[in-house]
Image (tube, rainbow, N blue to C red):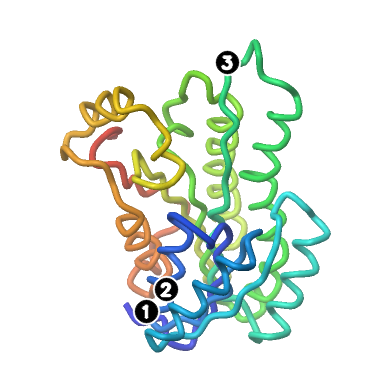
Amino acid sequence: MSLSGRVALVTGASQGIGRTCALKLAAQGATVAVVARNQEKLDELVKEISAAGGKASPFALDVANEEQIKTVFKEAIAQLGKIDILVNNAGITKNTLIMRMKRADWDTVINTNLTSAYLCTQQVISSMLKQRWGRIINITSVFGQTGQAGQANYASSKAGLIGLTMALAREVASRNITCNAIAPGFIETSMTSTLSDELKETALKMIPLGRVGTPGDVANAVAFLASEEASYITGHVLNVNGGMLMG
């Protein structure tokens, strides 16, 4: 699944799933623009990719800021020439029951997880249409499919990503651009590491494969959907959840 000659941009690339996706895409031959708020972590990631023989450039960006998105994407395209593959991965949680959820917590999660994907996609779609090739991959969640108590904002944002994926897939398919989503289940990241042992044990019982997922499990799926081997797949939600949700 060579991605040689392709340029990918990954949001939320400083840690967890985004970081592993960037490493995987670089290993497959893509030049990778790594995007996140933490410049120091991005610089470390670029060094790691370069040491392995890959190519990457860091771009500090808060995806909740529309003007920053427009500026940084212009810089990335000017520096790297194009963006062939967009991985909308950046996401946050602010969990609480809806009766206690503040409007600011709703808006922040929706803006970071969903609105940013719409804005980032807008910045790359014109060039993808012109070159008649593109891959847009949105990282959603099993909880965008099933819902989750205490995560009305997060589940709504991830469900919205699925709708965005399907609508966009229909809009751009005629230009050889695919748009797919990946829905991870319980993945071992810094976001899940803070959960109690009791909650982790409960989650494990819901997974038929009997283990939590790794960021690498998600990154492998991203690399596949970005490749030519997946050229006839669009508007699809690929479940990477160990069997938590089937059908």
As helix, strand or loop, the secondary structure at mark 3 comes to loop
Q: Position of residue 80 (x, y in %)?
A: 64, 85
The image quarter in which residue 232 lies: bottom left
Give the numbered dot on residue 97.
3
Crowdedness near tag 2: few (<14), some (14–19) or many (≥20) residues, C-alpha within 10 Å = many
Relative to 8, say whether 143 is above or below: above
Instruction: Residue at 20%, 41% (x, y): give it.
Output: 211
* Label 3 close to label 2 by CB (< 8 Å): no
Residue most extreme to the right: 67
- Label 1 crowd (10 A; few <14 / some 14-19 / many >=20): many
Q: Determine the image quadrant of residue 246.
A: top left
User: How far apart are labels 3 and 1 at the CA level?
Assistant: 41 Å
| Vertical arrangement, residue 161 with respect to residue 39, above or below | above
Name the image quarter holding the N terminus. Answer: bottom left
Q: What residue type is disc 3 on?
A: Leu
In this figure, which residue is indicated by the disc labeled 1? 27
